[in-house]
Amino acid sequence: MPGLFVTGTDTDCGKTAVSQGLIAALAAREQRVLGMKPIASGCVETADGLRNDDAERLAAAGWCEQPYARINPYAFAPAIAPHVAAAEAGVEIALAPIRDAYRALCDETDWVVVEGAGGWRVPLGDRLSMRDLPRALDLPVVLVVGVKLGCINHALLTQDSIRASGCPLVGWVANQVDPTMTASAATLDTLTRAIAAPRLGVIPWLDQLTPASVAAHLDPTPLL
Ligand SMILES: Nc1ncnc2c1ncn2[C@@H]1O[C@H](COP(=O)(O)OP(=O)(O)OP(=O)(O)O)[C@@H](O)[C@H]1O
Ligand SMILES: C[C@H](N)[C@H](N)CCCCCC(=O)O
Ligand SMILES: [Mg+2]
């Protein structure tokens, strides 16, 4: 299993937080891990070009430095749906540049943790959607459930859709994105019984969100 595709129940459910944590948790098991954010909408213009916060966080969590364009081949300025951002920029998102960047990363590491953008069915254009990425890169999937009211339905719909795509779901993580709602035992129990993959961790709301603070709540053993 040289890599993972991290998807989630929604945008802002904690995919970047969990991806950083998975990188750190695998690194603690003597794995060399790099992060990748193939498509990012929501970038700032810098002297070096467009830069995305998720991509930079994943880059910083990785075991060695990599060219930015490998970690984030498609970068768009507005923080909107990627297919809309791409259309506005006059760009057609294609799988080949993503595959090339992913392979270049694979050549330099044991693992690549690839973060999607938004949820599993986010469109990338007329013919492509986020779920085509793990298929193209032959990656198993980890599902991040942003724990809040409504997440059970979102998690089950996402699981159904992952199954329908034929991608293996190899783990899931409960992430408390709402500081006012503690993940009730009953909600966690419902999710744990309904999701047919190992639960890799339950991340509480963390005041200090770092790769290490998230990794402290993750057990990557089922992935190894
Ligand atoms: N467990 C947590 N404790 C505290 N803050 C959290 C936690 N999980 C996520 N957050 C915060 O919630 C916000 C959304 O999280 P994150 O950026 O990881 O979501 P995402 O799923 O990666 O979103 P996107 O679809 O934009 O990539 C961030 O500001 C992050 O710092
Ligand atoms: C900008 C944001 N943070 C994400 N990168 C993109 C979220 C796209 C969601 C599209 C949708 O499902 O409506
Ligand atoms: Mg993110």
Image: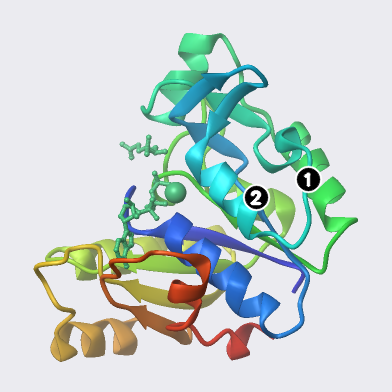
Image mark count: 2
Q: Tell me if 199 is positioned left or right of 100 in this view.
A: left
Residue 203, given in percent of the width and then of the height, sits at: 34, 77
- The kind of residue on which mark 1 rests is Gln
Seen in the picture, residue 202 relative to 211 is either above or below; the reply is: below
Residue at the image position 83 percent from the left and 63 percent from the top? 109
Q: Is residue 4 above or below residue 216?
A: above
Residue tagged by mark 1? Answer: 66
| 61 or 182, nearer to the observer | 61
Q: As drawn, is 131 to the left or to the right of 98?
A: left
- Identify which residue is drawn at 63% across, 68% down: 140
Residue lying at 59% horizontally and 53% vertically, measured from the top left: 58
Q: Determine which quarter of the picture holds residue 97.
A: top right
Few, some or many C-alpha atoms within 10 Å of disc 1 (few <14, some 14-19, many ≥20)?
Answer: some
Give the Cα distance between marks 1 and 2: 7 Å
Q: Is residue 213 above or below residue 3?
A: below
Helix, strand or loop at mark 2: helix
- Residue in front for this viewpoint, 143 or 51: 51
- Look at the numbered discs 1 and 2 and tell me whether their residues touch, using CB distance below 8 Å: yes
Numbered mark located on residue 59 in the image: 2
Query: Residue 61 placed where, x, y %?
Result: 62, 59
Query: Height in image: 10 above or below 129?
Result: below
Q: Quadrant of the N terminus?
A: bottom right
